[in-house]
Image: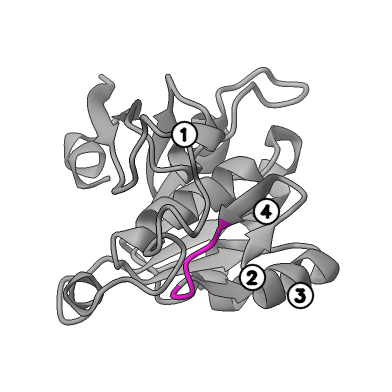
Amino acid sequence: MVWLFACYFYGGINPISKDFSREKNPGWGKRPRAKDQAKGKGKGVMKIGVIGAGSWGTALAILLGQKGLPVSLWVRRTGLLEEIAETRINSDYLPDIFIPENIELTNDLEEAVRQKNLIILSVPSHALAALIREIKNFLGRHTIIVNTAKGLAEGSCRRLSQVITAELAPRGQVAVLSGPNHAEEVSRLLPTASVVASTEQAVAEKV
């Protein structure tokens, strides 16, 4: 059985104006307010690692960072990492979208994964199996893995969630995050919707 849950994303800018500049939205892309940052402190707070700084991975990191949650973003290319660190913009994938200052940037997979409660995988489908093998020893026993990549595994045509589960066996809690939405909408904090699926109800609800 697969459990499906709908999510509703919304951020605090004016979607009608369609002006996503810092001038029109002075709080956007800056460090969240103290009361929002407080959500990311203390016991029971979910620590999140986003693996992959493409458009979708960056958009999800922005969304979570704006909520004041402790988030790290793994950027594979050193040049892009340095650019984002300096400008707080991912010009390759989401130009003109500011990345909150509280999002930690790294190109060290162990740093991005270790001691995280939830890992979001936003890498191409063909790279997924190798990535799982690379990070599995850094994962906690109860870490939840959320896949956002589309497609099927090369050669076997298995679902990507099946690939992840097989690579992590016998441990691993796996969920899938899908649309209907676009990374550009989520990064601009526009109202949009998503669906989370998992074979475990508790995992789907937690995500």
Cα separation between marks 2 and 1: 36 Å
- Any part of residue 168 in sight: no
The label nearer to you, 3 versus 2, is 3
Q: Is residue 184 above or below residue 25?
A: above
For mark 3, give the secondary structure. Answer: helix
Mark 1 surroundings: few (<14), some (14-19) or many (≥20) residues within 10 A: few
Q: Do residues under tags 2 and 1 come within 8 Å of each other at their CB atoms?
A: no
For mark 1, give the secondary structure. Answer: loop
- The circle on residue 82 is 3
Position of 79 with respect to 11 (left or right) is right
Q: Image point 25% across, 32% down: which residue?
A: 8
Q: Quadrant of residue 124?
A: top right
Mark 2 surroundings: few (<14), some (14-19) or many (≥20) residues within 10 A: some
Residue 42: within the magenta? no
The label nearer to you, 4 versus 2, is 2
The label nearer to you, 4 versus 1, is 1
Amino acid under disc 1:
Lys
Residue 168: x %, y % from top left: 50, 50
- Magenta residue span: 98-102
Q: Image point 43% across, 49% down: which residue?
A: 145
- Any part of residue 50 in sight: yes
Amino acid under disc 2:
Leu
Q: Image point 56% across, 64% down: which residue?
A: 73
Colouring scheme applied when the structure was drawn: one colour
Q: Nearer the viewer, residue 96 or 105?
A: 96
**Mark 2, residue position:** 109
For mark 2, give the secondary structure. Answer: helix
**Mark 1, residue position:** 18
Question: Which quadrant holds the C terminus?
Answer: top left
Mark 3 or mark 2: whose residue is earlier in sequence: 3
Q: Nearer the viewer, residue 32 or 199?
A: 32
